[in-house]
Image (tube, helix red, strand yellow):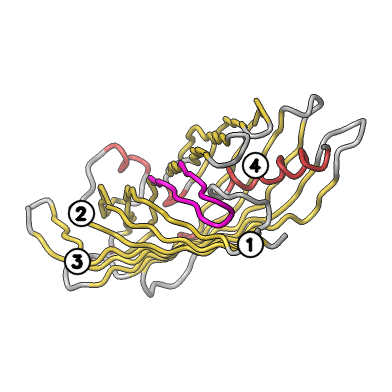
Amino acid sequence: MGYILSKFNIAFLFCILFQITTSFAQIIANSEYLPNTTIKDKEGNKGECDVWISKIGVNLPLIYKPATEERGIRLYGISLSAKHLQISGEEAPVNDVTACNFALTHFRTLSNKRWGFISCAGVGINKCQHLPIGSENLSAFALCRLDYRIRPKFPIGFGLAFTNNFDLPLVAPSFAISYKTESGNYGIEVASMAYDLKFRCYRKFGEHFKLALRTTYDRIGSPVVIENGKDQLFSYNYIFSGLSPEYCFNKKTSIGASLGYFLWSKMAFRERNLMSIFHSPEKEYQGEPSPFVSAYFVYTLF
């Protein structure tokens, strides 16, 4: 029983640090495609472009100390992730943006074993198009969160997340809630860290097939230099929702796809200073709702 609870706590750690996952050591790859997306600027001028969003993440535990009579579980690990946004089309304001993140993580259970404490700190690099990487591309982020296990399959967590991504300091609430039925056939997961929000509910059919409904709000951005040498920040924000059938070959490997709609998206340019968040962007392009298709791959290391 102690081993099962220990494994549960480790899984919950990485579930809320990087993205909703089911194990503490995983490789996750995901790609989303929006063909013929219509964008509109402030003047009402319209254009079309194709949008690709690709993501990859790796969660690895480095040091694991099991619980003893005197203290709870101790876990130290790393999380690596990357996003790439590619926009093609004559009207595209930016062609590609890449964001990479590296984080050190720590998790420990407290004395009564139902409570756990999670901390995370890392750095990110946000790069736009072919501009060289410098200090202006670096960002930092951190997370502190308490989690509480109401039941073995019903954990909740609340805390604070900090990021100075895009040179704009931000402190935001961070939370994660997940629930599974005793049989494991039904589940729901909700998680947020600073400026993203992920929701998923699913139903299992047998040992190999799962059908989920996913809704996600996310963003990617980078410093850019445009005409007249202005130092600005570009960001792409989006919300999508869709159905995701998933096939599990075994306990380690699964593949899935999503079909749905990008409900809302916006590309914006802001001045690179704190006050810009209180004003309308200098340039912005609103994306009209459009269908999308995505595919993902999950491999559990152990």
In-image side of 263 versus 60 (left or right)? left
CA neighbours of label 3 inside 10 A, class few (<14), some (14 to 19), many (20+):
some
Tell which of 129 and 112 is nearer to you.
Answer: 112
Select label 1 or label 2 by which is in front.
1
Q: Quadrant of the C terminus?
A: bottom right
Q: CA distance from mark 4 to mark 1?
A: 21 Å
Looking at the rendering, in which quadrant would you find the N terminus? top right
SS type, badge 4: helix
**Farthest front residue?**
206
Q: Is residue 43 visible?
A: yes
Asked if the residue at tag 2 contacts the one at tag 3, i.e. Cβ–Cβ closer than 8 Å, the answer is no
| Kind of residue sitting beneath label 2 | Gly
Report the front residue among 26 and 266: 26
Q: Amino acid at mark 1?
A: Asn
Q: Calculate the distance from the C-alpha at mark 3 to the C-alpha at mark 2.
A: 11 Å
The dominant secondary structure in magenta is strand
Residue depicted at 55% across the width and 58% down the height: 101
Name the disc covering residue 250, or none. 1
Residue 228 is at least partly visible in this image: no
Where is residue 45? Give x, y as percent. 7, 58
Based on the displayed image, in which of its 4 quarters is residue 236 positioned? Answer: bottom left
Q: Which residue is mark 3?
A: 36
Query: Which residue is the site of mark 4?
Result: 12
* Residue 287: numbered disc: 2
